[in-house]
Amino acid sequence: MCAVPKGGEGEVFDILRPAGSAVPLVLDSPHSGTLYPPDFRPAQPPERYRRAEDMYVDELFSSAPTLSLQLLTARFGRIYCDVNRAFDDLDPASLDDAEGLELAPSAKARLGKGVVWTATPPDGAPLLAGPVRRAEYLGRLERCWRPYHAALGELLESARAVHGRVFHLDLHSMQPVANAMHEDATGSLRPDIVLSDREGTSAGAGYLEAARALLIELGFSVTVNDPFKGAEILRRHGNPARGVHSLQIEVNRALYMDVETYGKTARFRDTRARFSAFLASLRDWAAKSGS
């Protein structure tokens, strides 16, 4: 357990910054956090609920600062407060008191994967020992959700102000095979990488194509917007008309970890090196694009 986060850098998020000037490519890893504050009361053991974490994704891309890139990482667990969901994406039935709250649950929230999770992967078993308390839900928004989005927004806007545009890569991982809590068919095999731009609305086509081509050159199999299209982070921050281009990348966990034991595999070092090469090339592309 950890102390209840208060909403600042080093408390609910960290920012890895380069020693010199940053280029117009910003990374964020919203789901690699491992801290679960005291108001998280699970009905499941850690070996069950930690399956939802994007384990090691922050490490896979941790070469960012040495490549003149900024990397924002959440410290809190995804299921505690999922910043890739809208702040109102919660099933009213999951709260002890939803009166007067204007909630808009999505299909993901109905599966127990809203801004506060209530179901446990992979089978959707109840995650919590009781309903989510209204005060806790609102408190997590104030301590975690809003500070994280504010920090990401500031990083993107600062880079855009300097360079006239900014390219954003939102980092995630995915199970190798779809389960009952996923929207693609249970048992579906996933590629190495899924790139998403919310069907062309969160980034210019050139950025998507550059990222896709670089990943393919490195030997990864890549699909676009299938089965993931991007969620709240891209919706909220991607704005190509203003020069803010946001892509989501989902990395198949089989490339670097054992999805049952959660340990790193022998492939981790090579996968990390390939992503470092990818970032270096994408950095060069971003620095030249629009110049």
Image (spheres, rainbow, N blue to C red):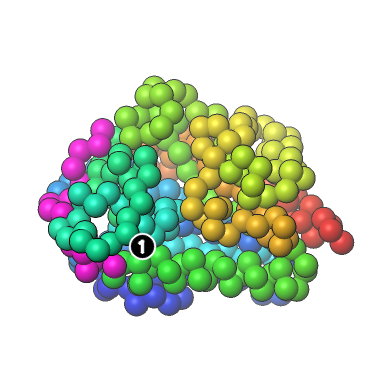
Looking at the image, residue 71 sits to the left or right of residue 5; the answer is: right
Residue visible at 27% across and 49% down?
Answer: 91
Where the N terminus falls, by quadrant?
bottom left
Q: Quadrant of residue 88?
A: bottom left
Q: Position of residue 231 (x, y in %)?
A: 49, 48
Between 202 and 185, which is closer to the camera in this rendering?
Answer: 202
- Residue range (magenta): 123-138
Q: Is residue 272 visible?
A: no
Magenta span contains residue 131: yes
Q: Position of residue 262 (x, y in %)?
A: 35, 42
Furthest residue toward left: 130
The crowding category of the residue bearing disc 1, from other C-alpha atoms within 10 Å (few below 14, some 14 to 19, many at least 20), is many
User: Which residue is the site of mark 1?
Assistant: 76
Residue visible at 34% across and 48% down?
Answer: 105
Q: Is residue 217 visible?
A: yes
Q: Amino acid at mark 1?
A: Phe
Furthest residue toward front: 100
Between 28 and 56, which is closer to the camera in this rendering?
Answer: 28
Q: Quadrant of residue 259?
A: top left
